[in-house]
Structures are given as structure tokens and as C-alpha cells.
Amino acid sequence: MKISVISSFVALCVLSGAAFSGCALVDERRDDCPEEMTLTCSLNLVNNKEQEMDEKLGTLHDRPLREALEDYLTDVFATTSHDVELLFYDQRNRGKMTFRQKEVMDAGQKVFTFRVPASDYRVVGVSNLSAVPMLSLKDEENSAGVAVVQKLSAKAVTSHPAAAFTARKRILVRDKDDQAFDMHFYMANSAAALLLNRDSCEVKSIRAEYIGLADTFKVLDSAYSFDQQAVIQADNIDVVPYTASEEDFSMEADPFIYDIFWELWTKMPLMVCGVGFPSPNVSSEVVGIYPKIWTIDLYVTLEDDSVTRSQIYIGRPLVAGSLMIIKGWICADGSFTPRPEHEPYNPGPGGPDEPPEPPSDSTVVGVSVTLQWKQGTEYNPEV
């Protein structure tokens, strides 16, 4: 009698027979074990990364930015997982956690074997949490409350260095009956990059914080919580200048085509990227007439050591498993201006009271600027 667990495509699963001596550790009645059960776990990496890269960084001129961002996101939009953990909650025993098992994967496919007594289970799976130290499991003993939570502090949380995956499944294991189940893992966090043209001024340093993102993911409910609205500290990304080769210039079209969104730059743009839990899907606030879903606080230190804070209001949700790229200019005073700026609001047939459509870019819906920004010792610009 055995249970084979097969993880397919990327990351996953679970449970080794070496950790158990049959069902005895869980239930003394060996006849409760099924003859054989097969559980196929697979990581479903459903994301928009390539589409977003193509739309926002699709020209040869953008190649150094794209390559730097691709490198930064290597472990975020990954096709393998380091470790996996399964929690089995017995619905015939008041939802009590019957057992849990951790396994090292470090591969895209691996087979595990174990035994489990027949029963009705709600199964929670988490993967790669060891690679994201600011995340942890909470309320594991309670099937209704088990969640992945972000370890918050008084300051901003460091950007997640890798992807975190979760899964949930209702599994009815029958007595002495061959059965097969599938369990799909999905990415629980997301990424957003801010690209800044700095041709208009001399910038000494920049810092960005993402505000209004989720702090908790309740796995069985598949729902995010925003009780504390975590602040994520974005990472600065070094960009290496790109020099076009003769092969590039042999292309039929001009390799350096500047789209209207980015426009020409002569100084290497600055770039930051942050990885965290998603934003809400809808907004309860508006800026002017447009919805504000989450915010980026951008701090720019100029050559004279003055600091300008731009609060950038984002009207597009940051969705789990997705990448968002936002472009803009740093003006002479250090303030942020989106490119392109959204079009003026034009009321529809319903008149001024009709809910407005999102702006054409549907990303930046407003910016609030504070010049000569100071806040005690909370901000010490790095030179």
C-alpha cells in the first residue's frame, strides 16, 4: 500500500514515505488506508510578464532596461520551487490538522510517496516560503484560519526575493480504492517596476515605497486581507548601458524607435522594482475623478541634497502573479510626471454623474508632490 505524489511542470508537492511508517502515526487502524492514491501537484505559472515587457519595454532602445528587469525577476517568475509543504485537515474530525509534511524539491518534477488514512480532507499547500523570509504560515491548526502572513514592522518590509505559491484542494480518500487527484499551485505575490527618465535633472539617489498592498492571504478562502496595508520597500536596479552591434543596425527598420510613452532619453534611466502581495481589486478612494487603488511614494534626492516626495496614485490593480511596469519623468524639481499623462475626463451619455472610465493608460491617475520634504530621521538619503 502506498501513495504516489507526482509533481509536474514546476514546483511542488509534498510528502515522503520516509517520514511515515505507514498510517500508524496518524491512525492505528491500518485498514483505513486506501490501496493506492495518486496526487499530482503542479505549479500553474499564469502571468502577464512577457506581455507587459513587450508593451512597455519592447524596442531595442529599451533592451538594457528589459535585461536588468528580467535578471531581477529571475526568482520571482520562476519555473521551479525550492520546497513544499502540505497540511491535511480532517473534516470528519472537526477540521483538525491530521498531519503536515515538508519536502525539499529544488526541481521542476519529483515523485514522493507516503501513506494517509481514508477520510475527507481539506488540503492546503504552500511552496517556496523558505525563499521568502518575510512570509510565514499562521493558524496552521485551524483550517478556517490558516493563512500566509507578511511579517510587518514599523518600517517598510523588504521586497520579496522570490515567488510564493499556494494551493487548496478538497480530497475524499476512500477505503481500499485506487484514486487520483490533482492539486494546482498558484503564485501568491506580484511585482511592479517604476522606470524613470532623469534627463531633466541631476539625481543623487531615489527611494520608492509601495503602499496599500495586502498583508495576509487566507489560503482556503483564496482571499487577501488589507487590515494593516503593508508597505513594501522597492529595490533599486542597476542598468548597464547597451551598445548596438552592426547586426542590430542591419535590420530593415531603425532599431532605435522611441515610442510616445517613453520618449528619447540620453541619460541612463533609473529603475526600481518591488515584489509583494497584490493590491485590492477595487478602490474606495478617488483622486479628482479617477479611482486610486494603491500608491507609490517616490523620494528623489537632488544634487543640492533636497528631497522631493511624489505620491503616485495608481488606478490599476496589482494582481497576483502579475507584473506592472510604470514609466515617467523626474522633473527639474525632482517631482514625478507620468508618461503619457492621462486624457481629460469626458462625461459619457449619462452626464457628469456617470462613473468615469479609467484613463487611457489606466495606471497613474494622479500625483501629489511635496518639495523640500523632511521627516525627522526617517529618511536618510544614500549618496
Image (spheres, helix red, strand yellow):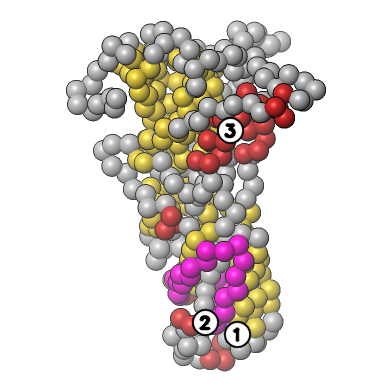
Q: Do the residues labelled 2 and 1 touch (CB within 8 Å)?
A: yes
Kind of residue at disc 2: Gly
Q: How many marks?
A: 3
Q: In this view, does 328 lie above or below 279?
A: above
Q: Name the residue under label 3.
A: 66
Identify the residue at horizontal 39%, vertical 28% (top origin).
208
Specify whether residue 107 is painted magenta. Answer: yes
Q: Main structural element of the magenta stretch: helix, strand or loop?
A: strand
Q: What element carries label 1?
A: strand
Distance from the alpha carbon under mark 2 to that under mark 3: 44 Å
Q: Name the residue under label 1.
A: 2
Q: Is mark 2 on a helix, strand or loop?
A: helix
Where does residue 381 sit, x and y in percent of width and height?
28, 25
Label 1, residues with CA under 10 Å away: few <14, some 14-19, many ≥20: some
Where does residue 329 sit, x and y in percent of width and height?
49, 15
Where does residue 201 sit, x and y in percent of width and height?
41, 11
Q: Which residue lies furthest to the left in this view?
A: 376
Q: Which of marks 2 and 3 is in front?
A: 3
Kind of residue at disc 3: Arg
Q: Mark 2 points at which residue?
A: 17
Query: Upstream in the sequence, badge 2 or badge 3?
Result: 2
Q: In this view, does 333 lie above or below 172?
A: above
Distance from the alpha carbon under mark 1 to that under mark 3: 48 Å
Residue numbers of the magenta segment: 97-122
Kind of residue at disc 1: Lys
Identify the residue at horizontal 64%, vertical 87% (top origin).
35
Label 3, residues with CA under 10 Å away: few <14, some 14-19, many ≥20: some
Q: For residue 306, what is the image quadrant?
A: top left
Q: For residue 249, what is the image quadrant?
A: top right
